[in-house]
Amino acid sequence: MLNEDVKKILISQEEITDRCKQLAKQISDDYSGKVPVIIGLLKGSIPFMAELIKYLSIECELEFMAVSSYSGTESMGDVRILKDLDRSIKDCDVIIVEDIVDTGKTLQKVKELLYSKGANSVKVVSLLDKPSRRIIDISAEYIGFEIPDEFVIGFGLDFNQKYRNLPYVGVLKEELYKE
């Protein structure tokens, strides 16, 4: 059972829903009169993006990119684009949806790529922020929750592709990933 692998629940489903409503209002206010292209970074952003966009009161367009920098619990350092955008974003206002801002390497690479493709502006909304692990000086404009340096799973976050479907953010039991 998935729940048996969780050391503790860090952020409940209700807290996530409430925070998504607040973030959506803030984004809707900031982008009033605009139609931003909202780009979800696969796969981790899917539950957060789905929850967030339900509460937006503005028109928006959706896109996805797949990027990778992780193997197991550690960032490999190099960021690989596995799936690029299916459309042009020239002169568009872009909002990247991210599950977690950790080292900042992935976010920096994706932002640079989107600007090189002609984006008018690029902002980031992230469910989680883990500033204690930051290597690159970068941050999201919209942050759901700041968390401590623990290995988190659920609500899109995974360990070796598992646990993404948990309806909350939890801390994975160390014995499951430490050798």
Image (cartoon, rainbow, N blue to C red):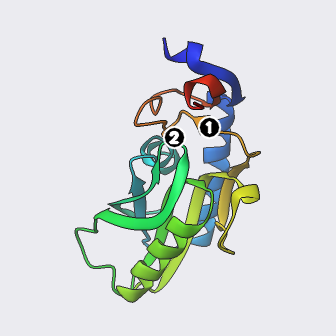
* Residue at figure coordinates x 67%, y 44% from the top left: 19
Mark 1: few, some, or many residues within 10 Å (few <14, many ≥20)?
many
| Residue 34 seen anywhere in this rendered image of the structure | no
**Amino acid type, label 2:** Leu
Q: Position of residue 150 (x, y in %)?
A: 70, 40
The Cα–Cα distance between marks 1 and 2, rounded to whole angstroms, is 7 Å
Q: Position of residue 104 (x, y in %)?
A: 60, 66
Q: Which residue is mark 2?
A: 157
Q: Position of residue 148 (x, y in %)?
A: 77, 45
Count of numbered circles on the image: 2
Considering depth in this image, is 132 or 21 the residue closer to the camera? 132
* Residue at figure coordinates x 53%, y 27% from the top left: 167
**Amino acid type, label 1:** Val
Residue lying farthest to the left in this orientation: 86
* Residue at figure coordinates x 62%, y 21% from the top left: 6
Q: Position of residue 156 (x, y in %)?
A: 48, 39
Ranked by sequence position, the earlier of labels 1 and 2 is: 1
Residue lying farthest to the front in this orientation: 179
Q: Which residue is mark 1?
A: 152
Assess whether mark 2 and mark 1 are in contact (beta carbons under 8 angstroms). Answer: yes
Residue 40, which numbered label? none
Mark 2: few, some, or many residues within 10 Å (few <14, many ≥20)?
many
Considering depth in this image, is 63 or 74 the residue closer to the camera? 74
Dot 1: element: strand
Q: Quadrant of the C terminus?
A: top right
* Residue at figure coordinates x 64%, y 66% from the top left: 140
- Taking 85 as reference, is 12 above or below it? above
- Taking 108 as reference, is 63 above or below it? above
Left or right? Give the position of 28 relative to 86: right
| Residue 161 seen anywhere in this rendered image of the structure | yes
